[in-house]
Amino acid sequence: MRVVGSGVAVLAGAALLTMLLFPICWMIASSVTPESRLFQSPRLLPSALSFEHYRALFDERDFLVPVRNSLVVAATTTVVAVPVAALCGYALARLRFRGRGFLLALILAVSMFPQISIVPPLYLMLRELRLLDTYPGLILPYVTFSAPLAVWLLTAFFRHLSPELEEAAMLDGASRVRALWDVVLPLAAPGVASATILTFLYCWNEFLFALSFTLGPERYTVPVAVTLLRGRYQVPWGQVLAATVLATIPVALLVLTCQRRIVAGLTAGASKG
Amino acid sequence: MAALRLEAISKTFPNGHTAIHHVDLAIDEGEFLVLVGPSGCGKSTLLRLIAGLETPSAGRIFLGAVDVTGVPPQARDLAMVFQSYALYPHMSVRDNLGYGLKVRRTAPAIVAQRVVDVAAALDIEDLLDRRPAQLSGGQRQRVALGRAMVRQPNAFLLDEPLSNLDPALRAQARAELRRLHGRLGVTVVYVTHDQEEAMTLGGRVAVMRDGVVEQIAPPLEVYARPVNTFVARFIGAPAMNLVPASLVGIDTPPGAVAGIRPQDLSLAGSGQLRATVDLVEPRGHDYLLHLRLDQPGLDPLLAVVAGAVPPAVGARTFVAVARERLHLFDGNSGTRLA
Amino acid sequence: MSRHMAAIEREERRHAACLVAPALVFIVLGAFVPIAATGWEALHGHDLRLPWLGRPFVGLANFVEAARDPRFTAALLHTVTFAGITVPLELTLGLALAVVMDTAVRGRALIRLAALLPWAIPTVVAALVWRFMFDAQAGILPKPLQRLGLVQESFDWFADPLAAWVPIGAADVWKTTPFVAILLLAGLQTIDPALHEAARMDGAGPVRRFVTITLPLLRPALVVAAAFRMLDAMRLFDVAYVVTGGGPGTATEPLSLYAFIALMQRLRFGYGSALSVTVFLLTFAFALIWVRALGRSLVGDRT
């Protein structure tokens, strides 16, 4: 019974691993398969190794431009959104003020807004302000839509810190702001790290706003550039797949190095404070 | 250092729960006052009100001659030892001890000196460069105490500081606290739910129930003359027996309740009260007996008796009461009569 | 109520206001003002290709047009059906994955890592990979599926109005199941193992324990995961845009995509806004019903 059970578990685990990883493996394998072999009978292991697609991406397609755009937008958004969210989360977790519950509900509501529903006025507004096809034009909606998640997550995180530590600091003579700086923030570092990673991932992956508010290859972010590599009549699959691999590398690095913080962030943000 | 005075303090929380009802309390300079009561009686809330961590809904708090009711905790210059100790986990013991002085912009050389002095007084000099996580429970407790002492505050507030220690360590720490208070002569407000701690530590003891101070007096007086049945049963272990006064031959006033400490009962060869031995709990130097009285509808009496051989369970016996040590309470209100 | 209390509390409120203000500015400017503006825009006739027509107020005309627009009704149906099919699938698979992760003695870290990758990669990447896997010429899936006799020789998954949903659904399920699993795993790990031991002492077998202990105690986590997935599925855009572009024809076009096309390709901002508003109302209505039906477990605030 036990042996059978563990055998089933191992099989199930192996099957799940295959299902989860197969598409990624195949993506990587295909991206290094020469174009000529790509459309012969598909196979998992490349029959010949070739980096022609990667070379083409950088030489002919200027793929560094979207990478740079994505990095700038994601980094700026993170630098703005996380401190803003940390302050708000602290207030929501610790301070007593009227409308706290309402504010939390408001923030939760924003995190479930369908993005498309604010595209039209933002488009018109950004066009009016001449911010279409600029970095700020993307950063504003990105901060708005990534902040609620970060606020939610950090509120949950701050609530898990013992309030006695701040109280001790205040009795030691520290003002609330000083206590926040000296005691709360150092202890909240793991939560802030989670929020930072999730915010960065959100920006790196966002598609609809980037597609709507950028007008040309000069300002495309990685997801938009990857998607629009496809021509109207013909898909250069080799290059597309090489681009998807490139789009995945930073994400994979984050996942590999910060697994724990990501899981903590996801579950803290999802469970009620 | 200063005296503390609470005037008609009440505290109602936003959820409508009233934790403190109109409490008046005066604590002398250099006094060791213990707030004791069952959990939920409001003793911790009262301490937090003194600290400034909560604001009273009504009433005023004086520190010396100064009204500090509206003063935030930072400016009251009080020190608090939390039940969890609340040591800053990311700072060394040295930085924990010095934090309060550093925040007050004390010169670094003076901070360092004060920290070393206090560490020496508490015998924790070897621990100065460790982090709280690397300390034992007893060591953390000392560091928490040290953090309070470093600043030479107006008063010390201690919130169940010994409850996280194991029993042996607790007795030791209790004695040490007592000595420390004798040496420093500081004002201390100490919260505990443990009546034994209250008895051994307090210069005076304030017994609280449901947000009200029921009695405030030196420990022996609280023990000897409890003002009502609640205090009578809360202070002293095992708890005082309460029986209808008529049972022990007291008929005036009618309906009165007699309180008898288990230590004041003994077994006898004859007498008014007949009982059956229900349970015998050996306690080492004596026995705790549960005695079922023949009169129906009464709780078993608890009696502490010494002796080499305890009575057998089920044995019939007479119970003798030390009449001169009887406490008499009103049957309805439970307040002390005479 | 003493004046002191007022002083300290005023101080605390002032602090709170300062700390909350920046976040509030972004949320109001970036979300609430725009959503109101979308609602307002939806009441106007506004076509960026015909600027000389101006922007006349037309009342609910755009909504009336939508109600009569078969492409809108179809898109609405697509959205709701897609959510109704993929979300239960994701919850079931996610639960299985969570249980495997919870019970796996060895390889747990590996499975968690493998689960995080699909969740973390950009949605368009997931969509492109699955688009490629189903590709008639280069894809790795059509041949084996033919051999299994599921489809005919040289079947094109993207030419069939119903079959085209399969790659969309596959990409969505593949990408989001791990997210569900991570939430449910956290829920599973809060269940006291002593409960399972107690049930075992009471004679309950593994299946019975799962049904009578695990599932009921996992309910809050399931409710939250289902809500997250439902709300996400109803704003489905990225996957559909990349995998099929809504095709063949408009057979796989969800509401968000139709709204996007009306806005960004046809530049009919009034009508497109009306479509966007319906997406908003749809998710909002769902969230409201969900919270009502399942109590406060979703937005429950401890204090």
Image (cartoon, coloured by chain):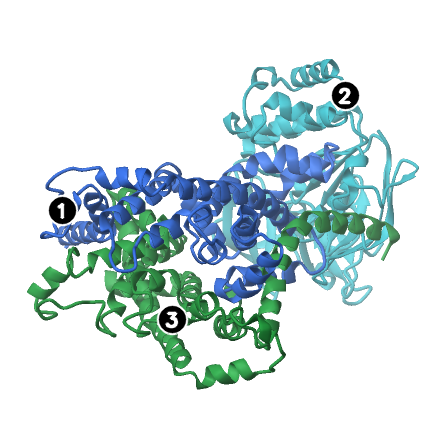
Chain colours: A blue, B cyan, C green
User: On the same chain: label 3 and label 1?
Assistant: no
Q: Which of A30 and C52 is in front in this view?
A: C52
In the rendered image, residue C23, in percent from the top left (x then y), is placed at: 63, 51
Q: How crowded is mark 1: few (under 14 residues within 10 Å), some or many (20 or more)?
A: few
Q: Which amino acid does label 2 sit on?
A: Thr
Q: What element carries label 2?
A: loop
Cα gap from disc 3 to disc 1, whole angstroms: 36 Å
User: Residue beneath label 3, please?
Assistant: C254
User: On the same chain: label 2 and label 3?
Assistant: no
- Identity of the residue furthest to the right in this view: B65
In the rendered image, residue B280, in percent from the top left (x then y), is placed at: 50, 48
Q: Residue B27 sits in which quadrant?
A: top right
Please report the residue visible at 12 percent of the width from the left and 49 percent of the height from the top: A43
Cα gap from disc 1 to disc 2, whole angstroms: 76 Å
The numbered mark 3 sits on a residue in which chain? C
User: Residue beneath label 2, please?
Assistant: B106
Q: Which of C19 and A247 is in front in this view?
A: A247
Quadrant showing the N terminus of chain C? bottom right
Could you tell whether B336 is left or right of A74 in the image? Answer: right
Q: How crowded is mark 2: few (under 14 residues within 10 Å), some or many (20 or more)?
A: some
Q: Residue C152 sits in which quadrant?
A: bottom left
